[in-house]
Amino acid sequence: MLYIINSLVTEGDATTFSLVGVASDKNKAAQLAAEVYKDYNKTASFQNIEMITEWLATRKNYSFRKDKSHRLQLAITELEQESTAPENKLIFSAAAEQDELMRKVSQALFEGKHSAERSGDAPSCPIS
């Protein structure tokens, strides 16, 4: 089985997608991805890099945020030569930060409104 390693770097409004490499071993793929993280986060400790390598080997993805506008996302995808399953064709998926934030805000507002409507005993507070 082959493993494809991808990275997506977001810096402000710019995003850069790149193919890091291909490995025939899951642990080697995790090490290659951890090297990208190490280059991106120069202050990472040895233990931190080891922990991320282990995470990548088991979960096959990792996301690191330096600050609000800088983010690194890594993904390892298994590639089976005979597979036609849609989940095996997905190389990398990244949702826009703003879209994800708006989805969560909408969901929180929706849930808050319904819980407020259910408690009929609560006094109404007019907004002026």
Image: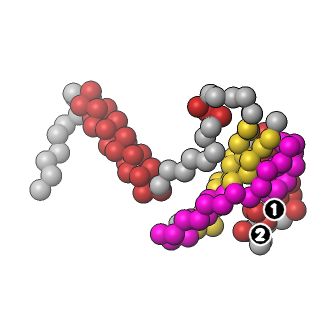
Relative to 63, 54 lies left or right: right
- What is the distance, in whole Å, between disc 2 and disc 1 at their CAs? 6 Å
Which residue is drawn at the image coordinates 47% and 56% (left, top)?
97
The boundaries of the magenta stretch are 7-34
Q: Quadrant of the N terminus?
A: top right
Circle 2 SS class = helix
Which residue is drawn at the image coordinates 76% and 63% (left, top)?
36
- Mark 1 residue type: Glu
Is residue 100 something that shows in the picture?
yes
Which residue is drawn at the image coordinates 81% and 62% (left, top)?
35
In the rendered structure, does residue 16 fall within the stretch colored magenta?
yes
The residue where tag 1 is placed is: 35
Q: Position of residue 109 (x, y in %)?
A: 32, 43
Circle 1 SS class = helix
Which residue is drawn at the image coordinates 79% and 50% (left, top)?
22
Compared to residue 64, the image places residue 80 above or below, namely above
Compared to residue 121, the image places residue 5 above or below, namely below
| Label 1 neighbour load within 10 Å: few <14, some 14-19, many 20+ | some
Q: Check whether the beta carbons of the residues at disc 2 and disc 1 lie within 8 A of each other.
A: yes
The residue where tag 2 is placed is: 39
- Mark 2 residue type: Asp
Q: 98 or 124: nearer the eye?
A: 98
Q: Position of residue 126 (x, y in %)?
A: 13, 47
Q: Position of residue 49 (x, y in %)?
A: 82, 58
Q: 71 or 119: nearer the eye?
A: 71
Relative to 58, 47 lies left or right: right
Q: Position of residue 90 (x, y in %)?
A: 61, 40
